Image (cartoon, rainbow, N blue to C red):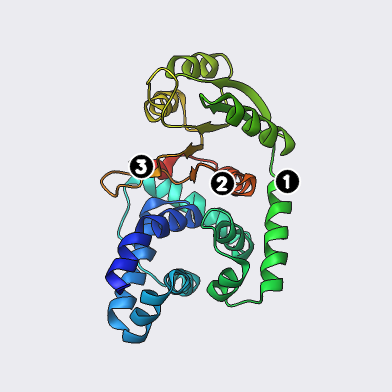
Amino acid sequence: MSVSDQIAIQLPYLRRYARALTGSQHSGDTYVRATLEAALADKVLREDIARSRAALYGAFTRIWATGHVEEPGLDSEGGQHEQAAQTRLATIAPTHRQALLLTTVEEFSREDTARILAVSPEEVDALVAQAITEIESESTTDVLIIEDEPLISMQLEGLVSDLGHRVVGTAATHAQALDIFERSPAGLVLADIQLADGSSGIEAVEDLLKFGDVPVIFITAYPERLLTGERPEPTYLVTKPFQEATVRAAISQALFFGSSKPLG
């Protein structure tokens, strides 16, 4: 596969990873852009990327780790959220979050994750375990689940409860979601994008966010409807069928940054 073909296939997913890691679409895209520029300037790197998805993520990781990429100015709202996200990031070592995202959300093997992070497979295991410990120590919050498939809704309820959070309600339609949220405002929303009555989970979330900022995780069998590159994309996006560890990772990231501003 040519490098251009490899990048075209992986770019939406690298952008998703970058947003989740940095807490901002703007910041994430800046590092992705720098990665692509590095690939254009380095023939060896281009050849590696053509052979391996992990090489692309490894290049991104090296550039992100330097922290020396200049970002264009942000509007005041985006800038405030970006500063808050970077303040949180400065307080912890991010490698364990990278390991968790790479092995769950991005579905790399532990061996590929080790190559991306330049650590041993055993260190990857330790980093993931550390990340899971961090998830379980997050402050508890109230969660609204917007999902029209009963079995998946029950699975998410169980997962959320196991993490120590409280489910304030489950909704199968846009109207139900608004009704529950008005009565019991949630601190986190898990949302499908295609609901039982033909209504849109995306529109439901947009209406919920009118009540105030709340982190949202989209869980969908149709990620291509959101990963288009044609409009602001969700920071937290999990593809069905999902692994519970993937949802745990997304919840950790969403609560870590504590905002849905990256959606904008």
Badge 1 amino acid: Glu
Q: Quarter of the image containing the C terminus?
A: top left
Q: Position of residue 200 (x, y in %)?
A: 38, 26
* Figure check: 255 above or below 11: above
205 on left or right of 111: left
CA gap, disc 1 and disc 2: 13 Å
Looking at the rendered structure, which numbered label has been put on residue 210? none
125 on left or right of 49: right
Q: Nearer the viewer, mark 3 or mark 2?
A: 3
Residue at 34% x, 79% y: name it: 46
Badge 3 amino acid: Leu
* Figure check: 167 above or below 236: above
Q: Residue furthest bottom?
A: 44
Q: Position of residue 2 (x, y in %)?
A: 29, 74
Residue at 37% x, 26% y: name it: 203
Residue under pointer 2: 250
In this orientation, does residue 207 appear?
A: yes
Query: Between disc 3 and disc 2, whose residue precedes?
Result: 3
Residue under pointer 1: 136
Front-lying residue, 252 or 170? 170
Residue under pointer 3: 226
Residue at 54% x, 55% y: name it: 87
Query: Between disc 1 and disc 2, whose residue precedes?
Result: 1
